[in-house]
Amino acid sequence: MQHAAIYKAPWGNLYVQETNGHLQQIRTFSGTDSVSEPNSFLTAVFQQLDEYFAGKRQTFDLPLDLQGTEFQMQVWKLLKHIPYGKTLSYNQLATAYGNPKTIRAVAAANGANPILIVIPCHRVIGSNGQLVGYAGGMTAKKQLLLLEGALPPELF
């Protein structure tokens, strides 16, 4: 059974959905999503997000229910291994996948990540060190990377 609620992130509302005690989505709230009060599982998700935003958590311990192609699943698994406070370029991520020529496909899989923050696609940047694309928005990406110490605050 699915259940969804709104989490208030520092930059705006996030839609958080679980299915049978497994996290399925964290994405920007559209305003038309059907939500209710968080159940016990979502309350636990919100607690871990609160700890993350307070700088007290660097990894998440949540069961996930990922839906995607085999390729996407492999890329999302690689994303989970990017350490807190570090970044990789799309080229480095494609190389970690095993084929630098897959850079566009890796970027597309990164952009299709259904569970923002927990699967840290925000840690992927352009090869020139610039912040590029983020499903949660560039303001969110900057805030997440600043929170993690991956960007010098004087740049913003």
Image (cartoon, rainbow, N blue to C red):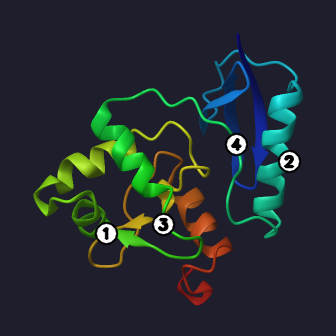
Q: Amino acid at mark 2?
A: Gln
Query: Which image quadrant for residue 31?
Result: top right
Q: Position of residue 89 (x, y in %)?
A: 32, 70
Which label's residue is closer to the chain start, 4 or 2? 2
Identity of the residue drawn at 15% across and 59% down: 99
> To which residue does mark 3 refer?
82
What element does badge 2 sit on? helix
Q: Which residue is mark 2?
A: 47
Check whether the beta carbons of the residues at disc 2 and disc 1 lie within 8 A of each other.
no
Instruction: Say which quarter of the image contains residue 15.
Output: top right
Cα separation, mark 4 vs mark 2, equals 11 Å
Three-letter residue code for mark 3:
Ile
Q: Residue at x 54, y 61 (%)?
A: 141
Q: Pick the residue in front: 122 or 12.
A: 122
Closer to the chain start, of discs 1 and 4, is 4
Give the mark, 4 or 3, whose residue is nearer the N terminus. Answer: 4
Q: Is residue 14 left or right of residue 41?
A: left
Query: In the figure, is residue 147 to the left or right of 86?
Result: right
Q: CA distance from mark 2 to mark 1?
A: 31 Å
CB atoms of marks 3 and 2 within 8 Å: no
